[in-house]
Image: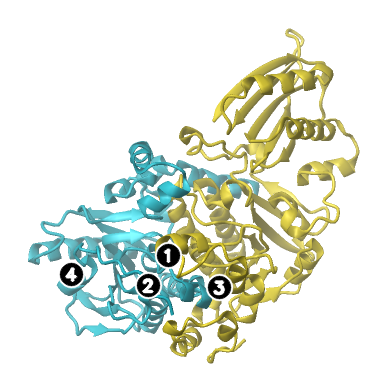
Amino acid sequence: MTSLPTNATTTAPEFGRIWFDLLNSGPISEDPGSLLTGETVLPDGRTAALAAVVPAPNSPFPRARQGEVGLRESLSLASWVASLDNPDKPLVLIIDVPSQAYGYVEELFGLNTTMATSVQAIASARLADRPVVSLVVGKAISGAFLSTGLQANRIVMLDHDGVQVQVMGKQAAARITRRTVDEMEKIAETFPATAFDGASFTTLGAVFETVVPKSAGSPGDEDSASALAAVGRAVDDILNSSGNDLRCRVESEAARTARAQSLLVRDAVNAQW
Amino acid sequence: MQTINATYPATNQVERPVHVGVVGSGDLEILLAPIESHADRPDELKVRVRTSVDGFDTVWRRVLDHFFENNRPVCTIEINDFGATPGMVTLRLSQALELATATDDDQMVGSADGSKSTGELPFTEMSARQRAASLLDSGTFREILGPSYHAESPHLEPQGIVPSSDDGCVIARGTINGAPAAVVGLEGKFQGGGIGEISGAKIAATLERALVDAESGHPVRVVLLLETGGIRLQEANLGLLAIAEIHAAIVALQRHIPVTAVISGMVGCFGGMGIAAGLCDHIVMTRAGRLALNGPEVIETEAGVDEFDSTDRSLVWAVTGGEQRVAAGRADVLAEDRPEAIRKAVIDLDTAPFSVHRGDRVTELAAQLADLDPAARPTPSELRTIDGRTH
């Protein structure tokens, strides 16, 4: 086989593992596919299932060693979510996923199919009235975010420099849209949807609450308490709302400004149906 | 991009609004709308051109002056151009005018479908509107949020990109084999079929509305014609959120009725929409169609040419093409690249709700994956015979 380039420049803290360890109060179970699962206790005493996809440096899948979501990660997550009992128990997904796994064997096997299983599992849990909250603690990129966090009823997001939400890396996006990185950054000032930072993503109206940690890289008890308090409020909001769909994302006040067309199109389709 | 406005004296009333063409490479879209005559002012023709190519105003004015010297329709004409030649511009203007002034019923159908007749065109060479119409029972095509509604992306023009009046997404209501249906067709020629706020919302809204109908006992069959590279990068996270909502809507609707994805080519189906297809109970493909998460070019860029040589076309299709996907159980039906063949394949699909969806087949997929040695770089034919497969 061919030798694969490894990304030796990854020096950012492993926010996913750090925050999982901080919040986890149950026995840690580490799946070979780099899925951490455990439990956390919300401020009202309720226990929630907890999971994070984290880097697995020894994975036999070289393209999924840096925390990328690949074949095993998506299937493991789907399998674990589908196996959860007690449908009232909330599910908290800790998100720090740099990208989907880019590789030959991934596409040969069908990464789109395995990612569909985790989407199906999380969406099915939500539709079965299990409260699902994503806690974005680091990167939330493209297919990796779609398959791990975006089917949650509510999204809670940490506000720190390590948080990124985008659909493609800066260099690649610049190349494809035939712009320089400088031009892209200038455009992002006017179009928050193209920016990378968490605050810009929040303006699109899909984030339930933002939490500013004292230290994102080495969080303490205070950070744990404020994150869990926000997750707890998200769970309460889910339980107090009537639907189990994602409508709150298009109906939020921010979305009515930043994504006004998303609601207008729905209204028009209904009217013309 | 550049905008050019022109006004001409006009004398001939036109019968109806018309839409022709596509905002895609070397082509253009024309929207023609009648203007009511007023006794107190002279009739006129207003033309607005938005073109992706700057600096050709004199050529545009020459082409328009020449065309409207002899044709004087009382109407507004909007042109969204993506680098069409003057000959192409004149051809499209002639088509639009012919349809706008025609009177017989056949021409009406033609105008709705975007051309008079699709003849013997392969499915892959038809526009999204034509493909959607070809799946529906004859005479039942009704477009929702059609071009005259101007549901164009508000995010493209400020970024210097010519928008399309339907944002590259066609919603068609009608019947398939007598049963109520909605077909959503993505236009791969417009911005690579990329999902923006509007096109994404059109797909999600269709699925969400079909769910409302299904819940009240009137299931509507939804067929998605997916020709898309994934998220439209200029709209980035707006496309990401829209795709998450599409995923959610497919899962919710399929508790009542299967959703069908048709991936015919030439663009293929990638990114978050590849996941959307992976959620659908039915996937129909042609040999030209490709289904994957990451496109070969992106893999080559991210991981190097040794990982995936995107210029090796036989490798690309051997891994992601319709024949392989169906043989390996990642898609269900391989159909010929003809509208009648695709329509027949769709009609033959089961419409009763599935108890186990494609996205529920975790155990089966995990068993297959356990038998696969990534270091051995398995071949496409090896994947077809892997254990754990039930197809």
Query: Do the residues indicated by labels 4 and 2 lie within the same chain of the protein?
Result: yes
Marks 4 and 2 sit apart, C-alpha to C-alpha, by 28 Å
Q: Name the residue under label 2.
A: A4
Density class for disc 4 (Cα within 10 Å; few <14, some 14-19, many ≥20) is some
Q: Are marks 4 and 2 in contact (CB under 8 Å)?
A: no
Q: Are marks 1 and 2 in contact (CB under 8 Å)?
A: yes
Q: Name the residue under label 3.
A: B255
Residue A58 pos. (x, y %):
29, 81
Label 3 residue SS: loop
The quadrant of the rendering that contains the C terminus of chain B is bottom right
Instruction: Decide which of tag 3 and tag 1 comes sooner along the chain.
Output: 3
Label 1 residue SS: loop
Identify residue type, mark 4.
Answer: Ile
Q: Mark 1 points at which residue?
A: B304
Q: Residue furthest left?
A: A221
Marks 3 and 1 sit apart, C-alpha to C-alpha, by 41 Å
The quadrant of the rendering that contains the N terminus of chain B is top right
| Left or right: residue A178 compared with residue A4 | right
Instruction: Decide which of tag 4 and tag 2 comes sooner along the chain.
Output: 2
Identify residue type, mark 1.
Answer: Gly
Q: Which of A56 and A15 is in front in this view?
A: A56
Q: Which of A239 and A111 is in front in this view?
A: A111
Q: Is residue A151 visible?
A: no
To which chain does the residue with label 3 belong? B
Q: Are marks 4 and 1 in contact (CB under 8 Å)?
A: no
Identify residue type, mark 3.
Answer: Arg
Q: Which residue lies furthest to the top in this view?
A: B40
Residue B358 pos. (x, y %):
55, 77
Label 2 vs label 3, nearer the camera? 2
In percent of the image, x 24 and y 53: which residue is there? A210
